[in-house]
Image: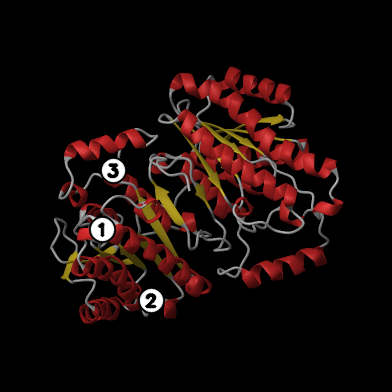
Amino acid sequence: MVAASNSPVTVITGGGSGIGQATALRLARNGDRVCICDLNADAVNATAERISADGGSVFTGVVDVRDQAQVSAWIARVIEKYGQIDCLFSNAGVNARALVADMTLAQWSLLIDTHVTGTFNFCQAVLRHMVPRQAGAIVITSSDFAIVGVANAANYCAAKTALYSLTKSLALEFAPHIRVNAIGPGPIDTPLLRANRTQAEFETARRTFEGRLPIKRLGQPEEVAAVVDFLLSDRAAFITGQLLQPNGGQVMW
Amino acid sequence: MTNANEHQGRVAVITGGSGGIGGAIAARLTAEGAVVHVLDVNPGAGDTRFHAVDVGDEASVNQVIDAIGAAHGAIDYLVCCAGIYRPQPFLELTLDVWRQTLQINLTGMFLSCRAALKYMTPHRFGRIVLFSSMAARTGGKNIAHYAASKGGILGLARALAVETAADNIRVNTISPVITDTAMPRAVVSDEYMQSRKQHIPLGRIGKVPDMVEACLFLLSDDSSYIVGQDLRVNGGSTLW
């Protein structure tokens, strides 16, 4: 599908893998002009090649979301190219597991800076261009762990809970014309879920997840992409400030 | 991109399917090619298959849903919209109105789910959407019975979701904020309805199409990993 000149311009962070990549592919198929960035140049280029091969429209960047100057510069290039931004999916994330007693400040800061400050940086840069047009939709990747705590993940839980709080504040500050929602994925089979785990450790984790999940299987990135698509679209025109959880029933509240 | 034909031929049962929200969902599913059965006390406007049923009556719910299940061999979708809204100050709230509200709003959903699941579980396919209300979380003046019934729906849905998810049956709820339909208009003034806008960040009350889109999303494969969740379609009025 060829993107039309009036089709939505959608910015996606963490577009090189997992949920960000699946969302980029889906929205490009919808006809969006997709702008993806990632810290990993090879990953973002690989996603872009798949979009192009599919006939979609894509613009890329290698951006460290923690660095406000890099974020501003890349958003300026997006605006230079397209003149507008309609949607933002702030999704870039990392993980570093440790018990609090053993957690280094670097492990703590990596997660807070990437998830929370990175989302702040992108939301601020993008909202500056949405507000004058009185239109826009934002989705932020939070987590089930915004609601429940887990061991070995205090940094991740704190970051994801902060993102849910940020979502609610943004929804109130930028209503009625701009909507801001969060997603709270459960265990999704992505490179992030596999990171820092051997194949054997991953299989053990998978069995543990599957055993306790009502739906008895891990989620796929495409299943989360469909939820992001819904929340960014006019189908969700009356939904803002909410956390929608594609989580296989892991957390219900 | 959503699958354009996924509702084609699906057998759908919609309780309260003659009302503002239920009727619009029935019309939309019919337009998308589903085989739609409406259960309601009053006939609606559409050309759907209508069954006069009080959802609080066990025997008639079982009889009608069994007949639908037998006729089609399966029931794919159950959407429960049937409900009553009869505000009364708490100290004047009669036991009759309390019971009637719980019977229709909450027990009616239990009975409908129980009857329909018999035609979902064997096929390992089912999508259930129950309409709760933001009142379940926020409460409100004169609606203790209504809020209790709607809160009960959230608990019912979560428990049922856990029981059925492994059978490829997904149960979720929708919690609308006040929506422009005949149900609230029967008991509150237009002035009151419009005044609610002030408390809704998106600057308006709910519209029927908002609820239709939310319901279609939860029935579709776009929500394939969403189980036991409450989709709050409320314009940001309550952020939890």
Quarter residue B72 falls in: bottom left
Q: Residue furthest front?
A: B91
Rendered location of residue A1, percent (x, y): 50, 39
Residue at mark 3:
B207
Q: Amino acid at mark 3?
A: Lys
Residue at mark 1:
B90
Does A114 appear above or below B184?
Answer: above
Number of marks in picture:
3
Rendered location of residue B165, percent (x, y): 50, 70
Q: Chain of mark 1?
A: B
- Viewer-nearest residue: B139 or A36: B139
- Viewer-nearest residue: A117 or B96: B96
Residue at mark 2:
B117
Separation (CA) of disc 1 from disc 2: 36 Å
Rendered location of residue A80, percent (x, y): 60, 17
Q: Amino acid at mark 2?
A: Leu
Rendered location of residue A223, percent (x, y): 55, 55
Does the image show residue A54?
Answer: no
The answer to whether the residues at label 3 and label 2 have Cβ atoms under 8 Å apart is: no
Disc 2 secondary structure class: helix
- Viewer-nearest residue: A23 or B114: B114
The answer to whether the residues at label 1 and label 3 have Cβ atoms under 8 Å apart is: no
